[in-house]
Image (spheres, rainbow, N blue to C red):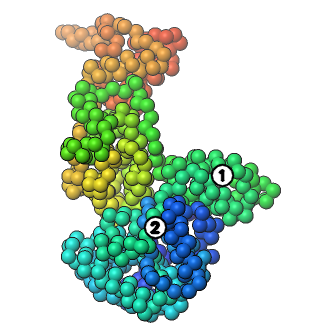
Amino acid sequence: MEWRQILLLTVLSVGIGTSAWSMDDKSPTSTTTYEERGLSESVNFACFSLSAEDTALLNTLKKRLQITKKSGLSNCLLIQGPMGSGKQKLAEHIAHEVGFKFEEVNILPLIRNIMAGNGSLALLELFEGIKRNNCQATIILIPYIDLLFKSIEDEQIKHLLAKQFCESLLDFHKYAKYLFFVLTTSNYLFVPKVIKLSTINNTVALSLPKQAKRKLILRDLIQGMGISVENNVSQEYAQKTAGWTLRELATLICETSKQVRSVAPTERQAALKSNLANTLKKIQALYKIEFAPHQPHTTLYFSDDVNKLINPIIMQLKKNPELQENNNTVQTSSLMLYGSPGVGKSELANKIAWEAKAKFIKLLGANIVNKMQGSGSEKISLTFSRAKSLPGRVVIFIDELESLSTHKAASKGTGEDNQRAMTTLWDELITCEKYHPNIFIIAATNNLKLLKRQIKDRFDQAFKIEYPDKKLRENMIKAHAQTLGKTIERKFKVKVKNPSWFGDAEQEKQVVTIKHFATKTKNWDARNIYKMVKAAAIVTEGTVIKGKALDRAFENRKKFREDS
C-alpha cells in the first residue's frame, strides 16, 4: 500500500466513522475495540494538548466512570479543537481507561436526513437505535456536532432539533446511566447555544501540540512500533513538524513503520532515520504549507497600478486588528487575484505577507482536490484551524482556486468532495470576517469564469494582474542581469529588412539592447523574461551579456513557448 493510500485511510478512519447507516438500519453506530485502532493505543493521555484545568476535569471524570460505571451528574462531554487534534482519540482513550465499550455514530446519513426535512424522525431513530443496541457501559461518540446543525438554514428548525437532541440526552441520563456521550466539534461557534448550556460543566478544548508535546507523541508512537528511539531523533522531528496535528504525526509514523518492519531488527535504527526523513518530505510536499513568507525576489517588479492597489492592504495588515475593530475601522478581510499564469499572483501574495510581517500559510488548490488525499473540506478546515491557533497577523493564500471548480472536478471524479470543500471555504470566509480579524485570505485563479458566483462574491476585493508593460520589462531585464552578476551590452547591431522595388533587402541597424528586447517580449511574464536572461548569462564568459547571446536566448525561449 502506498503512503498516499495510508494517509487516505487514516483520514477516513478518523473523520467519518466505519459504517454507513440509513433509517432502516438496525444500528446507527460502529463498534471498534481500542486494541483494533493500531497505533492509537501507543498514544497515552499525556500526549493530548490540554490545559491543566481540562486535564484535572478529565481525570475526575475518568475516576467517577471507572468506579461507578455510571455517568453520574452529567452524561455528556463536549471536546472542541482543530481538525486532526485528536478529539476522537481522546474519546477512545477515556473508554479504554475506564473499561467502557466504545462506539462511534456515523453522522453523514443523519445530515442527509436532516437536509431532506426528516431531522426530527432521524434523531428519534438515532437515539432509539443506540438504546436498543447498548445494554452495558458504553461511551458513544457523536463527531462533528457543528456540521450536524450547520447544515440547517432555518434558525427555528435548528433550535427545535437542538432542543430535541438535548432532551434525548437527558432521557438517557435518567434511564440509561451506563451510557456516556462524547460530542466533538472543530468550530465551537457553530454549536447551538442550548447544547453548549447542557454541556457547560463538561467541556474541554484540545489545541495543536507544541514542540515538547510533539516530541512525546513521536517517542510514544515509535516505541509502539517496537523500536527503541534515540532522544535526539524525536527532538529533531518535533522541531521539523511545527504546526502538525496529532493525526499528521500518526500518519508520519504509520507510513514509516510499514517500511521499517520489513528490515532486520539490528538495522531498524538506521532504517528509521532514513525513512522518517523521506516520509516527512512526502507529507510536506503533499500539504505545501509554509508558516513564513520568503523574501520577495528583488528582480520581480509590479506596475505602479498594482502597488497602489496593495499598499492600503499592507498598511492595514501592519496595524493591530483589535485596535482597528475598536475604532470602527472598515477592514478588508479577503482578496482575489486573477490573471494569466505566470504574471506573479503567488509572488504578490507573498509580497503582501512579507511587507506586512505576517505569518504565511500557503495551500495549493490542486492538492485539495486530489482523490488520494482524502477530504478536501477537512484539509481547508485544518488549514484555517492552524491559522486561528497562531498569534498575530496571518495571511492564508489559496493558489489555483479554479482547481476546486465543479466543472474541473467532474472530470477527475471529485465533484462531491469539491462541493463540500467550496462550502467549507465559504463558511470559513464568513467566520474569519466576523470573528478572526487577524486572518487575511488571498486566493488566486488563472480562470475566473470557472469559479461559482457565490464564492467570488464572498471576497471583499478583486485585482486583475496583467502582463508587465514595456517600461517594467526593461527594469526586469536589467535587474535580472544584475542579480546574476552581469550587465547588458548597451547597444548591438541587428539585421532588419528594408523593403524596396527589388525585394526586401537586409541591412544592419544599431539598437539599444534592453529597449529592443523589452519590445520583443510583449505579453511575456516575469518568469519567462528571467529564463531568457539566465540562458544568455550561462553562455557569457565575461561580465557583459552580449546582444547576440540575448537574441539567441530569446529565439530559443520563444520557440519553447510556442511549442508548449
- Is the residue 538 above or below the residue 144 in the image? above
3D distance between C-alphas at marks 2 and 1: 28 Å
Residue 182 shown left or right of residue 269 in the figure: left
Q: Residue 355 got which mark?
A: none
* Residue that carries the numbered disc 1 in the rendered image: 234
Few, some or many residues within 10 Å of mark 2 (<14, 14–19, 20+): many
- Label located before the other in sequence (2 or 1): 2
Q: Amino acid at mark 2?
A: Val
* Residue that carries the numbered disc 2 in the rendered image: 204
Toward the viewer: 138 or 248? 138
Residue at (24, 10) in percent of width and height: 498
Q: Is residue 124 visible?
A: yes
Residue at (41, 61) in percent of width and height: 378
Q: Amino acid at mark 1?
A: Ser
Across and down, in percent, residue 290 comes to 46, 44
Q: Secondary structure at mark 2?
A: strand
